[in-house]
Image: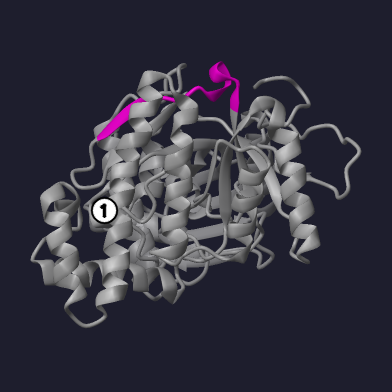
Amino acid sequence: MSGAGTPTDPTTAPESTPMSVDVTWTPAWDRTEGEERARALFASVYGTEAAGVWSAPGRVNLIGEHTDYNGGLALPIALPHRTYAAVSRRDDDVVRLVSAQEPSGVREVRLADAAPGAVTGWAAYVVGVAWALREAGHAVGGFDLAIDSCVPFGAGLSSSAALEASVAVALDALHGLGLAGTVDAAGAATDDAGRSTLADVCVRAENEMAGAPTGGMDQAASLRARAGHALLLDCLDGSVQHVPFDLAAHGLALLVVDTRAEHSHVSGEYAQRRASCEEAARRLGVGTLREVADDPQAVGRALETLAAGDDGDLLVRRVRHVVDEIARVGEFVTHLGTGDVTGVGPAMDASHDSLRDDYEVSCRELDLAVDTARASGAHGARMTGGGFGGSAIALVDVGAVEGVAQAVADAFAAAGLHAPAFAVAVAGPPAG
């Protein structure tokens, strides 16, 4: 997967070939380029050099969607696409922040004034991390920050978690908090317990300061992933296992399709799904739906109980997705462990169908990307992320990457939709 100039190299775009419509690739920057971009922006805005540059990856969730806030299992990988944060400490409590992706210029916030609802837009994610660290008892002061990123925004690839995690590891280093540890040459973090704490900080920032009721899988992936591995995350107790994930060794690639249909976790649809699950758990007398999923004999009784109440059909479909999706994560991991990697395809397909029909978080663009990839020879395909737009993934043979991407691009053009963008995902290192 590392051939220069091929679509299976995530850091480069493929050379053009004759095609009916142009195919757009979203390459990842190499670390040097990303760091230089952030440093240059910092120097141009603040007139001085940054103390350092830290970065954090976006993520692709292989399977386990909308399970995190239900105490379930998820299986993400860290992307090679990262957000870069150039940062310096200040001697007051002022935070100044600027992003190459935001045209609004420099924003300034006093940490003394930071509170849920007091900071809006992308600044809420940044200031929220500092606020959550202070709320947890850490002495964090003001800082100057410049952000540049190659994680696509609004694509369901956790651009917000990458932003939070890059700021978290920067503040950890600048203030000597001792939570992030280091990332070794193999792309593994040396202090998972501390990073789990930082992930919790980032979740609080996103939930309370940014107002997005996410469950924590994204932040765990960005901070706790390992290069060359998928992260099996148990969202009930926060424990993780690192599952080897080397598709190239099996002649395969994971094609990411950014549908360009933007989504937002701050919108009401995501919150409604979470509220439905919480209501179902309340009616069933359990703390999370994981308790139902872990007892196969209880699933049928639980669905019967829900069906008899108000909104019974809706709650049954929501719970059925969560229970089945948790089981699909286990099935996926089993196939990886036995080396039957193409065997994960049916689980991917079933996951998307469930998200479309039972959880109702897909959309026209996601369905078209998935259906076209399947028809073009993908071993499996599904939407990834929270849904309502964003990205889909397809497991394809290495030699089929360009053909599947072309077919999807052509299908979008024929449907009159915005042109999608493509990337090939490999499991990268965590924030650091």
x and y percentages locating residue 224 in the rendered image = 36, 35
Sort mark 1 into few (<14), some (14-19) or many (20+) by Cα contacts within 10 Å.
many
Is 127 magenta? The answer is no
Q: Quadrant of residue 272?
A: bottom left
x and y percentages locating residue 223 in the rendered image = 39, 39
Indicate whether 349 appears above or below 214: above
Residue 24 falls left or right of residue 114: right
Q: Which residue is farthest left? A: 285
Indicate whether 159 appears above or below 333: below
Q: Which residue is drawn at 42% across and 50% down?
A: 351
Q: Quadrant of residue 281?
A: bottom left
Q: Which residue is drawn at 10% across and 61% down?
A: 286
Number of residue marks: 1
x and y percentages locating residue 322 in the rendered image = 30, 56
Q: Is mark 1 on a helix, strand or loop?
A: helix
Question: Can you identify the residue that label 1 sits on?
Answer: 323
Q: Nearer the viewer, residue 127 or 164?
A: 164
Q: Nearer the viewer, residue 257 or 432?
A: 257
Residue 114 visible in rendering: no
x and y percentages locating residue 313 in the rendered image = 29, 74
Q: Quadrant of the N terminus?
A: top right
Indicate whether 76 appears above or below 361: above
Q: Quadrant of residue 404?
A: top right
Indicate whether 258 appears above or below 335: below
Residue 91 visible in rendering: yes
Q: Residue at x 49, y 55 (%)?
A: 160
Residue 219 falls left or right of residue 405: left
Is 247 magenta? The answer is yes
Identify the coloring: one colour
Which residues make up the magenta segment? 240-252
Q: Residue at x 33, y 58 (%)?
A: 321
Q: What residue type is labelled 1?
A: Val
